[in-house]
Amino acid sequence: MTATPRPRATASTRAWRPATEIERALHEAVMDDDRIGYLRALATADLFHYVPKEHKDGGGNAYVPADDSQGIWCLVMRTAGERLPRRPRFVVARTSLAELADTWPGRRYSLHVNPGTPAFMRLTTGALDRRRWRRIVREETAELPTDTRPTRLLTTAAGPRTGPLAHALACGAHLSVANGVLWNEVGDVYDDYGREVGLLRESWGTATAQDWQEQMDALLAGRNSPVEPEFALDIRQELAQANTGAVDADLWRRACTAVLTDMEAPAEADAVVQELIGRVLRYESRFRADGLLPPDGFVRSAVGYDYGRAVSFARWGLSARLCPAGTAEASILRAGELCRKAYGSWEDFSAGYALGRVLRFDTEEFGQWYAKVLEPHRVLTSEPGSPWRTIPWRMPSTV
């Protein structure tokens, strides 16, 4: 394995800024001629390469080799912060150092990471090199569950970090942090073109621009999630405002029954709501123990789960080429506005998002559906660079 010579500072490299912590670590390794450090930085990073859209749509997964300026055949990979601008005929495919070690097309190709930047390194790819890649990946990912990307906050210096768009993107940060992707980007890819297309088709029944718009409208209207949680939470919120404080569980239950009786709802509806109230109370107790709620806190609304997902759904749709950039950005901004109207703080919103998620999928198992919202909450409320600590919740000029 060889590396490029230690670079000399030029006007262009002095102007370059690492987009994320990943590029910063790679650049430091290049400057120190630390090839092992470079591989360690790559071990948990996503790597991206570009393929023709028609090739990917046709089921092709092969890497597309390139001939660099020195006549060396190579495969070009880029980290998240150094992906190229959106191009109509090309889409992004995600891989990893571990996957490359197992699927490398042949020794004749070298690996070029982030060419044209100060974070560039050229790596040889013989059997011993790839064995080293596997070892380093094992060491760096030993504490991660199998096939799990690290939960991490990734901020790109090139993306919005203040203002309404940054605020709205931060409303989708639960999923961004859980998936280890950039939170503050509206670009060509959220994650990977093929995965986005598959996710939208298989999990959302979305394969066309019309499908995408219908689902987005449902999310922004709070109609994607079941209606019963919001019904019960709305009644408790009204009781809390009338009683200026916490609401006794029995009073909440009786009030829901009374409203359903006035609506002439069937008896089964009351049974569903009563069971739901018990689940909400048990989840809120766990939320308080885990810091998702303050000791005397309760969730005012779960609609944030739809609004927060709308941010990611917009980015997925843009990646899958189901909507134009302007439509995706407008949807993201609308989701942020709705979040601000429904909640009073980042923590308030996060608890509502978490409750909506676990009521929909967790069934009180407190497994991955819960862990994948609790871990991002802790990251976003604690890390100094988190948008939840740098962007104010209230934005008077846009509300």
Image: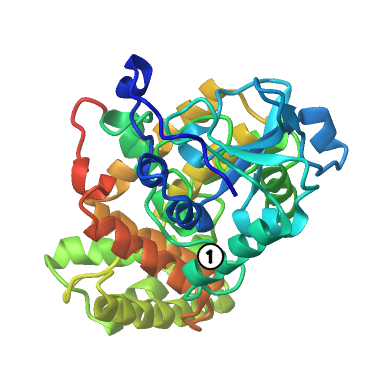
* Above or below, comparing residue 186 to residue 70 in the picture: below
Q: Nearer the viewer, residue 218 or 371?
A: 371
Q: Nearer the viewer, residue 86 or 101?
A: 101
Q: How many marks?
A: 1
Furthest residue toward right = 58
- The reply to whether residue 320 is in sight is no
Q: In which quarter of the view is residue 383 placed?
A: bottom left
Question: How is colour applied across the structure in the image?
Answer: rainbow
* Residue found farthest to the left: 244
Q: Is residue 21 above or below residue 85?
A: below
Which percent across, then down, holds residue 82?
A: 49, 33
Instruction: Give the camera-side residue of 187 and 142.
Output: 142
Q: Position of residue 375 (x, y in %)?
A: 38, 67
Q: Secondary structure at mark 1?
A: helix
Question: Where is 46 relative to 372, above or below?
Answer: above
Quadrant that contains the C terminus: top left
Q: Residue at x 36, y 23 (%)?
A: 13
Q: Which residue is mark 1?
A: 136
Nearer to us in this view, 32 or 386:
32
Report x, y in % for residue 28.
35, 43
Q: Please give left or right for residue 317 compared with residue 157 in the image.
A: right
On the picture, is 124 further left or further right than 294?
Answer: right
Identified by mark 1, the residue type is Ile
Could you tell me which residue is drawn at 47 percent across and 34 percent down?
5
Q: Is residue 368 visible?
A: yes
When asked about the image quadrant of residue 49, the answer is: top right
